[in-house]
Image (cartoon, coloured by chain):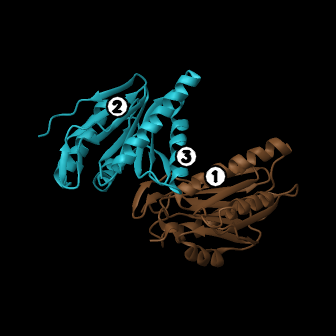
Amino acid sequence: MSIMEYNGGAVLAMVGKNCVAIASDLRFGVQAQTLSTNFSKVFPISSKCFLGLSGLATDILTLHQKLVFKNNLYKLREEREMSPRVFANMVASTLYEKRFGPFFSEPVIAGLEGPENKPYITAMDLLGAPVDAHDFVMSGTCTPAMYGMCETLYRPNLEPDDLFETISQCLLAAFDRDAITGWGAVVHILTPTGVISRKLKGRQD
Amino acid sequence: METILAIKLKDVVITLSDTNAGRSIVKMKDDEDKILVLDQHKLLLTSGEAGDRIQFCEYISKNVSLYELRNGYELTMNAAANYIRNELATAVRQSPYQVNLILAGHDSHDGPSLYFMDYLGSMQKMSFTCHGYAGYFLLSLLDKHWREGMSIDEGVQLLHMCIQELKTRFIVNTNYIAKAVGVDGVRVVPLLPAA
């Protein structure tokens, strides 16, 4: 039993045309037992930056609290919002600080960078080693299934509605291949004009 | 592992706990009250390691009282839940409290609410939940019969259904105690005597 598979869960982010999408499943469970179907693993940091966290539920909550705290201090001191790239760097440092006793959580960050709102996504492992991608990133217990679906269905420069369709199909199919993810999904589409959030139903098992 | 469960109704949260106190195969006491009254509008149900349960409960209880004494008002449910979670999460990497809890209560902000927490510091706000072996029998029963906005009578009926299920299929035979917490405070809910 791996500690990263104790609670289960998955997060996926994808780049579109002047937009990004980030999504997660909604299951909260302990090994085989599902306890709640309303645990979103994607958290807003600002209107232009969202953070997704997979892995151990307690560390998801702790990391979220720590990062929101650090973000708020930055906003108070600098009197401006943190850009997604800078936020990602801060997440990586926060994780590496615990190199020899890490948080068991692997983040995915999605945002719109700078005044031109250039899409930005990145993911890292539990020690904070980042990987910037131009198409899609994911973390969680069903990453192999998600990689397969994304590689097949992804096309560059998708409009927000098409991006929503694509990311939804990728998630739902991938979740069906993993017993400890699923029970619905939440998808957030970040565009320069605002955030559109939708809940998906999917197979409730 | 003790049975603890809580169900959110329209105006109150109703909670159930077994009254067994024992070690290994010996039942030392069969009328133990495990539902701690944290303050006027909060109940803390705990299950887990014997010493840790009592020590952790008392620690939380005294700190919650201290907040009320210092500030003149009670903690909100969300604040209390996050406080307890943070205590558990801080301890988990040093000397974990092996305690699983349910925090049930009422505040003016959210109405009746209940929070599930486990010994690692995971937390979820839920409509109904159980800890321990009871979950294997009762979660699906509650999925089927719980609805939004149930009255207290319907809630008590649901509790009796849960007790009946445990009496039928769970190997450990015990008595149960139930308490409800609402805007008027905490009260013991009388359960029908064992059939």
Q: Position of residue A80 (x, y in %)?
A: 84, 46
Decide if residue A31 is on the left or right side of residue B159.
right
Q: Residue furthest left?
A: B195
Q: Secondary structure beneath disc 3?
A: helix
Q: CA distance from mark 2 to mark 1?
A: 33 Å
Q: Viewer-nearest of labels 3 and 1?
A: 3
Q: Which mark is residue B86?
A: 3
Which residue does the image show at 55% across and 50% down from the upper left?
B90
Residue that label 2 marks:
B180
Q: Position of residue B113 (x, y in %)?
A: 46, 36
Q: Earlier in the sequence, mark 2 or mark 3?
A: 3
**Along the viewing direction, whichever of A176 and B112 lies nearer the viewer:** B112
**Mark 2 residue type:** Ala
Q: Position of residue B64 (x, y in %)?
A: 50, 32
Picture quadrant of residue B24 = bottom left
**Mark 3 residue type:** Asn
Question: Are discs 2 and 3 both within one chain?
Answer: yes
Q: Is residue A108 above or below residue B13?
A: below
Decide if residue A3 is on the left or right side of residue A157.
left
Q: Secondary structure beneath disc 2?
A: strand
Which chain is in cyan here?
B
In the rendered structure, the colour chosen for chain A is brown
